[in-house]
Amino acid sequence: MADLLECVIQIKALRETLALAETGTPSIAGFGPADAEFAPVWPRMADAERRYAEALGTEAGVRPACATESGDSARARAAFAAGRRANLAMLSDCSAAQLGGPVEWPGRPSTTVADLVAIMLANDTEVLGGLRRGRSTPESRAPTPYLAPNRPRTT
């Protein structure tokens, strides 16, 4: 029961990042960075969201990779928001049994949907939290392979 509650709280937290992408302003008091400071993160966030959608089977609601490859932050932010909305819609409809169901995630055997939710939130925290602390940007550190693997796309 505790794991289910934790997952539900994490899904709620994922909505905070969606609110940030949709409004362009932080929904958490004192978050700090202006929209321009977020610009470099949206392509990385959109790419990660596509990979989560592949694992969850919600690719239909996610924009293709070409939507973010141009380097246009606004398009990448919109692609991230569309993907996150699709993923959250799927996650919101999951039963407790479905949250405990398996998903394929590179480098992590025996990953459940609830595990993937935790991975999604960890990525949000790593990327956006780094901006909040002013310590890092996506270009200044190596990607974390278990959060958003940099593997070649097959489609």
Image (cartoon, rainbow, N blue to C red):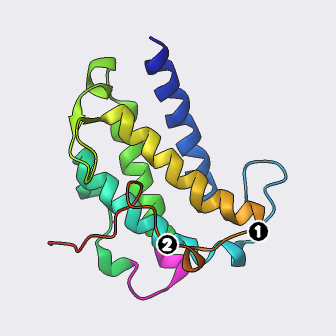
Q: Is residue 149 left or right of residue 118?
A: left
| Count of marks overlaid on the render | 2
Rendering quarter of residue 145:
bottom left
SS for dot 1: loop
Q: Residue at x 23, y 28 (%)?
A: 101
Rendering quarter of residue 54:
bottom left
Question: Is residue 72 in the magenta section?
Answer: yes
Residue located beneath label 1 in the image: 134
Q: Is residue 118 left or right of residue 139?
A: left
Q: Quadrant of the N terminus?
A: top left
Vertical order, 136 against 73 (above or below): above
* Place of residue 109 in the rendered image (x, y in percent of width and height, measured from the top left): 23, 41
Q: Quadrant of the C terminus?
A: bottom left
* Place of residue 76 in the rendered image (x, y in percent of width and height, measured from the top left): 47, 74
Which stretch appears magenta? 68-76
Q: Residue at x 43, y 45 (%)?
A: 119
Question: Is residue 147 in the magenta section?
Answer: no
Amino acid residing under circle 1? Gly
Determine the CA span between mark 1 and mark 2: 16 Å
* Front position in the image: 27 or 10: 10
Amino acid residing under circle 2? Ala
For residue 142, the mark is 2
Q: Residues within 10 Å of mark 1 (few under 14, many from 20)?
A: few
* Place of residue 50 in the rendered image (x, y in percent of width and height, measured from the top left): 33, 61
Q: Which comes sooner in the sequence, label 1 or label 2? A: 1
Vertical order, 74 against 11 (above or below): below
* Place of residue 142 in the rendered image (x, y in percent of width and height, measured from the top left): 49, 72
Q: Residue at x 73, y 56 (%)?
A: 26
Vertical order, 120 against 114 (above or below): below
